[in-house]
Amino acid sequence: MASSLLDKVWNAHTVRTLPSGQTQLLIGLHLVHEVTSPQAFQALRELKLPVRMPARTFATLDHIIPTTAQQRPFADEVAEEMTVHLTRNTQQSGVPFFGLESGRQGIVHVIGPELGLTQPGMTIACGDSHTATHGAVGAIAFGIGTSQVRDVLATQCLAMAKPKLRQVRVDGALPRGVYAKDVILAIIHTLGVNGGVGYAYEYAGPVIERMTMEERLTLCNMSIEGGARFGYVNPDQTTFDYLRGRQYSPQGAAFDRAVTWWKSMASDAGASYDDVKRLDGSAMQPMVTWGINPGQSVGVSERIPPVESVAEPERPTHREGLAHMGFEAGQPIAGARIDVVFIGSCTNSRLSDLRVAAQVARGRKVARGVRAIVVPGSQLVAKDAEAEGLHEIFREAGFEWRNAGCSMCLGMNDDKLRGREMSASTSNRNFIGRQGSPTGRTLLMSPAMAAAAALTGAVTDVREMMR
Amino acid sequence: MSENARTQIVGRGIPVPGNDIDTDRIIPARFLKTVTNEGLGLHAFEDARKHDPEHSFNQKVYEGASVLVGGLNFGCGSSREHAPESLKQWGIRAIVGGSFAEIFFGNCTMLGIPCLAISQDDVLWLQRAIGRDPRQAMAVDVERQEVRFGDRVIPARIPDGARNQLVSGAWNPTGVLLEAGDAIEATAKRLPYVSGF
């Protein structure tokens, strides 16, 4: 019988069926960071249990670290304390740790794929909702809370209910200036911010098949913003080419054997889906959010929709969005004034993102009064970008070039909006208060669009600025 | 019956109107800068409360309430268990809503907080009814999948797996997962990527 990747991965990792009816699912790769792990390690100590499979667990530091001066001890005492805790917890339990001095530190969802830790056919868990990112290589990857981090540390397993499976097909071909970020924002807008609850999303169709691995990472990253805890792309030649030669990828003859297994884990032709949705990539344009959840978006040439245009249950959030953002229904999104530009986050901080933004910025200047920062996703991304001179392009244009971390995506370090500042951000959430100021405002968009906004000081259709 | 069993929660309600109440709203990220869970309850809805003096979490009449009634897609966003933990420390023992974001739902279950879904019409009715009579106790019956307020019996839903865990008291699964013993390592060894291809 034809099966999906979800079926195959789920079956291969099933330890047993629990009395509750849930599956005891083995977790093949557990990624750990400083914010959601200290209480879990503490719980383990109280239970007097060791980390069950330290060799299948990897840790890094991303959420709280400063992206400017990184000398230890950090000026922020709590950030320092959290760093000390993670360092000690990983040392005591034998968990490999990519700290600042490793040269491999970065946002957990950037370094996993980059180091080849993330591989097709795996189950991957991490105490962070954007773990769905890793589904881009054909893994079942999902975010968990701290009690579940404790369970994975202690048992390498989780009690899970298998989700339903929806195929999201994107047909056609993307027009120039339209990127993976625009595709996922369009998907969330179309299917709704809670449309994916209870589902895993399998992204498919010609637009997805033509995407590079970094584009697929951007796509899968925001699955959770559409309510889907899991999102994946079936592994193919693009995946295998991406993984070849990475630090933790299988080497030599083992790599060829791995490819054979990886291919066997992809969804079979004729696999069954609980649901199929189709979107036309050819009709897409650069997307910009105007509201307070990632589904409240329009194409850059469009106007902010009136309250009456949405279904009744969505109207309170729609009104709240307009009020918080200070926008009027019917107003074009293009031309909205910007105070801050943030290019970074686990959604859009990889080398290809920085290249696109740098290409827009090259030879131009950040608009007066705009604060623009570029935060590479990892130390390796920073190194590669600097080798290409991207940091110089950004600096000459008036952007700040920072060190790797989560930064202004969620404002847990010093990188925050101030007051009601409006930000053009390549991150994944425009929730009220998300970027560190309770009254701050966030417009989500692609790196190309964010770079364009930095240069003009307003939401701008980047296609008009592309060379 | 286990002392952890969550068959039924009885207490006063507190409405949190609106849909898509995200975890950044429930507890802003700056309060996640901690290595313990101490004091999280003080920061539940902190920014929303500052912004809106009428926020239900500011109203004296709702002090001591233990059943939060929210709208659709409650708890969307981040996987931070700090969000349900802060509600728990504030005093919330059960949540009723139009629908729940999945990770939030799972985190609540792990803390022994049942989340039951009711229709959006019933959400609006219940929020108004609590507003009119905040001293009235309500019941969240996990076993029978219903919510009772006064004379009204509202049908509610909770997925079977979580319901079984809560009703049996086995919502903290560490022990039951450990019982699998060597089967865990045996499953791992069968995976080509664990054995080195």
Image (cartoon, helix red, strand yellow):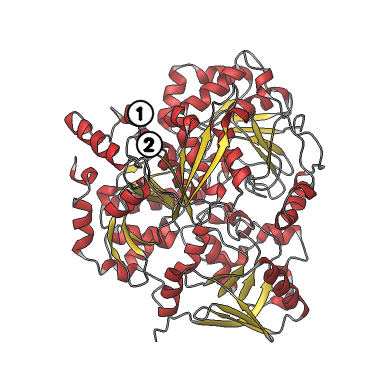
Q: Is residue A342 visible?
A: yes
Q: Is the residue marked by circle 1 packed among few (<14), some (14-19), or many (20+) residues within 10 Å?
A: some
Question: Which residue corresponds to the image point at 28% horizontal and 36% vertical from the top-left?
Answer: A248
Q: Which mark is residue A242?
A: 1
From mark 2 to mark 1, how far is it between C-alphas? 9 Å
Instruction: Assess whether mark 1 and mark 2 are in contact (beta carbons under 8 angstroms).
Output: yes
Q: How many marks?
A: 2
- Provide the chain ID for the residue under circle 2: A
Q: Is residue A273 above or below residue A458?
A: below
Q: Secondary structure at mark 2?
A: helix
Q: Residues within 10 Å of mark 2 (few under 14, many from 20)?
A: many
- The amino acid sitting under disc 2 is Pro
Quick check: B120 left or right of A17?
A: right
Rendering quarter of residue B40: bottom right
Q: Position of residue B165 (x, y in %)?
A: 41, 73
Q: Which mark is residue A177?
A: none
Is A387 situated left or right of B184 in this image? right
x, y (%) of residue A182?
Answer: 59, 33
- Helix, strand or loop status at disc 1: helix
Circle 2 sits on which residue?
A113
